[in-house]
Amino acid sequence: MTNKVQLKKLAKESLTPMMNRHGYELVNGFDYLKKGPNEIYYMISSTISYSEHLKLFVGCYIDEMEELTSLAFPKHLPEMFGGGLTDEYPIQPTKWKIWQVGTESEAIESLKQIESSIQKYAFPFFDSIQSKEDLLAFLPRLPAKGPWVPVINKIKSNI
């Protein structure tokens, strides 16, 4: 059984130093955050279910998203502009991988794969989002309905 505290300890040797070298800080247990250009924050947030399944969301946060959550950013990293981290596909809202972290050996192996996937897919995604206009260009990949519609309208009015 693995939780975010245990993952944080296991990631100390490889994943976290790699993320730190790229300007990300570890927040909220096992989430990574970096302030990018133009008031855009890059984030990788984690969810663990049943103490053995880890999902990672790769996305961006902007101030216009504040109204969507009652929890303060960065204590809460809302999932909106971005998608799931996999070891096979670029970042997109409909693709996710469930990494096995139920045992220490599974967690160590998954962390190696996650590090590789972040370098292969997450960093290029973040490199492609340098402005709010770039975020809007990503939006056609999102469903036409949802909590982000008011945020999209707010972004458009602020550009």
Image (cartoon, rainbow, N blue to C red):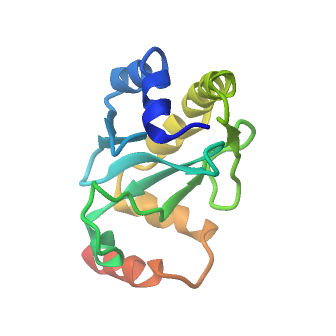
Residue 62 x, y percent position in the rendering: 31, 62
Residue 33 x %, y %: 34, 42
In the picture, measured across the screen, residue 149 lies left or right of residue 67, that is: right
The outermost residue toward the front is 1
Q: What residue is rendered at 62% in x and 32% in y?
A: 117
Q: Is residue 43 above or below residue 72?
A: above
Image spot of residue 71 (x, y percent) = 28, 68
At x 44%, y 61%, the residue is 135
Q: Position of residue 101 (x, y in %)?
A: 65, 35
Quarter of the N terminus within the rendering:
top right
- Is 6 drawn above or below residue 138 in the view shown? above
Relative side of 83 to 76, left or right: right
Residue at the extreme top of the image, as rendered: 13
Q: In the displayed structure, does residue 87 sit left or right of residue 5?
A: right
Depth order, front residue of 128/145: 145
Counting labels gives 0
Instruction: Tell me the quarter of the image containing the C terminus.
Output: bottom left
Farthest residue, direction right: 88
| Residue at x 24% of width, y 64% of height | 72
Please tell me whether residue 24 is drawn above or below residue 69 in the rendered image. above
* Of 20 and 40, the residue lying toward us: 20
| Figure quadrant of residue 133 | bottom left
Q: Give the vertical position of 152 relative to 83 (above or below).
A: below
Q: Residue at x 71, y 46 (%)?
A: 97
